[in-house]
């Protein structure tokens, strides 16, 4: 029954993710044609700071809410779910509001000193307004994931994506063509408004769902302590990892400038890889990300029930299927790279870099699944520790290598980081559960 439920939820989440990514890819092509590779690169820098701010806003509560509610349901304390949700929402509101205030007041300093581009200040201030809504929505998403109502969150995500695109198009039409600052601010305005709409929809659906499926509150021992024991360590490690990751992204254009690129040329090179190639690379990964998301409550429930053999079988089967899928996708992207670059972006450079990164697809996809398994088995701190080590090495390499080897150096750094991170993750997973990628053949007994 659990297997059928996992397959059903995976199909739902994969279908919605595929629809969202189709829409997003078409929109990305239009966005590149509207603001150019340099504009996409500038927005990427704003997004890297926004990612750090969102990490502070969420502060580990998305995974904490999923884990906490999964534990309550796994121990058949359905009535404790409401109490857990109220606690998680209060936590998320505090951190969401605090991160919004910090980013808004520090936008000028961040834009001038951190990013090194004054054109990002307006966008950062607009983006700060979305942070409380991102934080609150993450808790409700954790509830839908843990309680098996993922289809409701999936529908909301698709609607949000359509609203986001529509608003961005409207705001960009009002922005003067060629003005990268105003264009970037227009994109951020559309994104912020879409986050507000998404939160409103999530809240409405959540309230109706709780009324229909909820029960009266019942005692759940040490609930605040359990939430904080998950969220706080995860938040601290996420702060470190996101800070280092953001620093790495901000150092890339600076390193390219030191290598001889102009300001817009550096943004264009960075934007080609991050804003054009990676969306294609990760486009087919929707089934992998769905499995990585949904495997968390399944493994958590199995773990609290002491089902070690079931965990081993589930993890091994998931890794085998993910390996086959990722090898197939990597091969297809490698073969079709030149065609995809020309057809989607009308860019030879995009096709060239796509062929290179297609070789890394199996590692990237398998790392997603491995991280999901580690989180589901309560190994999230190990996972975050590996990510911090990875980011530390990345910052060092970007700072020292990029000025000498330009984009070729950046590609090499990405390859090294991905392989390094996956190697550590799969090692840790093999220590907490038995992995059998190639199960022994079944021997039939002769009569």
Image: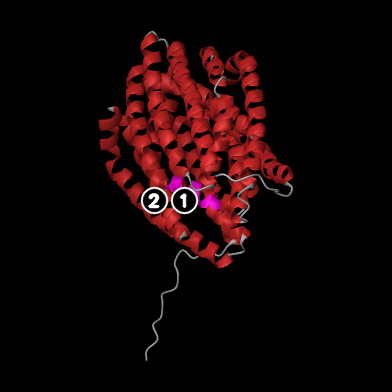
Q: Main secondary structure of the magenta part?
A: helix
- Residue 5 on image: x %, y %: 44, 54
In this image, 220 relative to 425: left or right?
A: right
Q: Circle 2 is placed at which residue position? A: 326
Compared to residue 251, the image places residue 88 above or below, namely: below
Q: Quadrant of the N terminus?
A: bottom left
Confirm whether residue 251 shows in the render.
no
- The mark nearer the N terminus, 1 or 2, is 2
Q: Which mark is residue 301?
A: none
- Distance from Cα at disc 1 to Cα at disc 2: 7 Å
In this image, 228 relative to 78: left or right?
A: right
Which residue is painted at 32% across and 43% down in the image?
Answer: 333
Which residue is painted at 57% across and 33% down in the image?
Answer: 245
Which residue is painted at 36% across and 19% down in the image?
Answer: 36
Compared to residue 300, the image places residue 412 above or below, namely: above
- Residue 150 on image: x %, y %: 47, 44
Are the residues at dot 1 and dot 2 in contact (C-beta closer than 8 Å)?
A: yes
Mark 2 Cα-neighbour bin, 10 Å: few <14, some 14–19, many ≥20 = many
Mark 1 Cα-neighbour bin, 10 Å: few <14, some 14–19, many ≥20 = many
Q: Is residue 357 magenta?
A: no
Badge 2 marks a residue whose secondary structure is: helix
Closer to us: 330 or 58: 58
Which residue is painted at 36% across and 40% down in the image?
Answer: 18
Residue farthest to the bottom, as pictured: 447
- Residue 81 on image: x %, y %: 61, 45
Magenta highlight range: 288-297
Confirm whether residue 212 shows in the render.
yes
- Residue 291 on image: x %, y %: 46, 50
Q: Circle 1 is placed at which residue position? A: 366
In this image, 348 relative to 295: left or right?
A: left
Q: Quadrant of residue 107?
A: top right
Q: Is residue 289 magenta?
A: yes
């Amino acid at each position: 029954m659990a297997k059928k439920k996992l397959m059903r939820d995976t199909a739902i989440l994969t279908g919605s993710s595929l629809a969202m990514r189709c829409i997003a890819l078409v929109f990305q092509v239009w966005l590149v044609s509207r603001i150019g590779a340099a504009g996409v690169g500038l927005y990427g820098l704003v997004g890297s700071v926004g990612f750090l701010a969102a990490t502070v806003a969420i502060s580990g509560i998305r995974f904490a809410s999923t884990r906490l509610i999964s534990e309550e349901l796994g121990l058949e304390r359905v009535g404790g779910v409401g109490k857990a949700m109220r606690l998680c929402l209060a936590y998320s509101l505090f951190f969401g509001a605090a991160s919004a205030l910090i980013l808004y007041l520090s936008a000028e300093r961040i834009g001038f000193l951190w990013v090194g581009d004054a054109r990002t200040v307006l966008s950062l201030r607009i983006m700060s307004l979305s942070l409380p809504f991102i934080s609150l929505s993450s808790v409700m998403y954790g509830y839908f994931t843990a309680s098996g109502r993922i289809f409701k969150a999936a529908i909301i995500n698709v609607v949000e994506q359509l609203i986001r695109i529509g608003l961005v198009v409207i705001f960009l039409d009002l922005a003067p063509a060629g003005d990268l600052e105003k264009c970037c601010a227009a994109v951020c305005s559309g994104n912020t408004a879409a986050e507000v709409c998404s939160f409103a929809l999530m809240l409405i659906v959540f309230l109706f769902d709780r009324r229909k499926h909820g029960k009266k509150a019942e005692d759940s021992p040490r609930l605040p302590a359990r939430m904080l024991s998950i969220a706080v360590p995860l938040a601290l490690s996420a702060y470190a990892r996101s800070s280092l990751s953001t620093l790495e992204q901000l150092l890339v254009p600076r390193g390219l400038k030191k290598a001889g690129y102009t300001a817009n040329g550096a943004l264009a090179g960075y934007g080609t890889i991050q804003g054009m190639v990676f969306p294609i690379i990760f486009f087919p990964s929707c089934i992998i990300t769905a499995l990585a998301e949904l495997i968390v409550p399944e493994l958590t429930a199995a773990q609290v029930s002491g089902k070690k053999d079931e965990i081993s079988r589930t993890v091994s089967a998931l890794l085998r299927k993910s390996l086959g899928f990722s090898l197939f996708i990597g091969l297809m992207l490698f073969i079709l790279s030149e065609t995809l670059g020309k057809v989607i972006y009308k860019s030879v450079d995009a096709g060239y870099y796509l062929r290179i990164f297609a070789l890394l697809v199996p590692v990237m996809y398998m790392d997603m699944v491995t991280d999901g398994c580690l989180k589901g088995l309560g190994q999230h701190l190990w996972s975050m520790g590996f990510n911090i080590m990875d980011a530390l090495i990345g910052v060092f390499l970007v700072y020292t290598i990029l000025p000498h080897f330009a984009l070729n150096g950046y590609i090499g750094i990405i390859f090294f980081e991905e392989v390094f991170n996956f190697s550590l993750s799969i090692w840790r997973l093999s220590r907490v559960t038995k992995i059998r990628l190639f199960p022994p053949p079944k021997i039939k007994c002769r009569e």
